Image (tube, grey):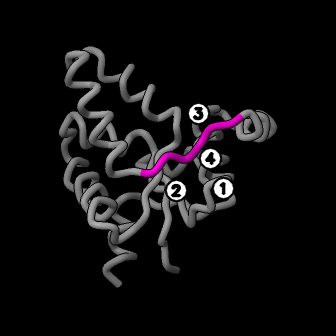
Amino acid sequence: MTFNRILVDTNICIDAAIVRKPYVDTALKIINLADTGEIEVKISAHTFDTIYYVLRKEFSISKRYTLIEELRSVFGVAPVTQRIIDRALKLRWKDFEDAIQHEAAIESDCDAIVTRNRSDFQESELPVLSPIQLLESLDS
């Protein structure tokens, strides 16, 4: 299957931001693919504020804003609307944030969700790939 438009989960962005080993290499490859236009990559709107909050102990305010600006320049934004929240609520998933990611991906016509936590998306209507699986699918 070809994946032209994907939604990247928050953890991939954080992996790149804090250079989290051993995940940083695949995260950076995905960012590069998005930057060069080889694939269209989106992150959900609420991922930006989640990243800003999670990285508060790692980086200064200025550095967090710079990071958010860099991510926004590479990734498209999958909106999180009232409709998406309502649909995510109906899913009743264990992790509500993942339900929002799922519904934002569907609403944005994504072909897949890419995450390191595939088990969190067991009920997904979309294919759920690890970063390595995505990269392997693009190589074949």
Q: Compare marks 3 and 4 and give the one earlier in the sequence.
A: 3
Mark 3 and 1 residues: CB-CB less than 8 Å, in contact? no
Mark 2 falls on what kind of element? Answer: strand
Q: Amino acid at mark 1?
A: Ile
Q: Amino acid at mark 3?
A: Glu
Residue that carries the numbered disc 1 in the rendered image: 106
CA separation in Å, label 1 and label 4? 5 Å
At 62% across and 62% down in the image, what residue appears? 109
Do tag 3 and tag 4 residues touch (Cβ < 8 Å)? no
Magenta-highlighted residues: 76-81
Going from the N terminus, do you reach mark 3 or mark 1 first?
3
Q: In terms of secondary structure, where does tag 1 sit? A: helix
Q: Residues within 10 Å of mark 4 (few under 14, many from 20)?
A: many
Q: CA distance from mark 3 to mark 1?
A: 14 Å
> Which residue is most to the bottom?
140
42 horizontally vs 53: left or right = right
- Which residue is denoted by mark 3 in the rendering? 97
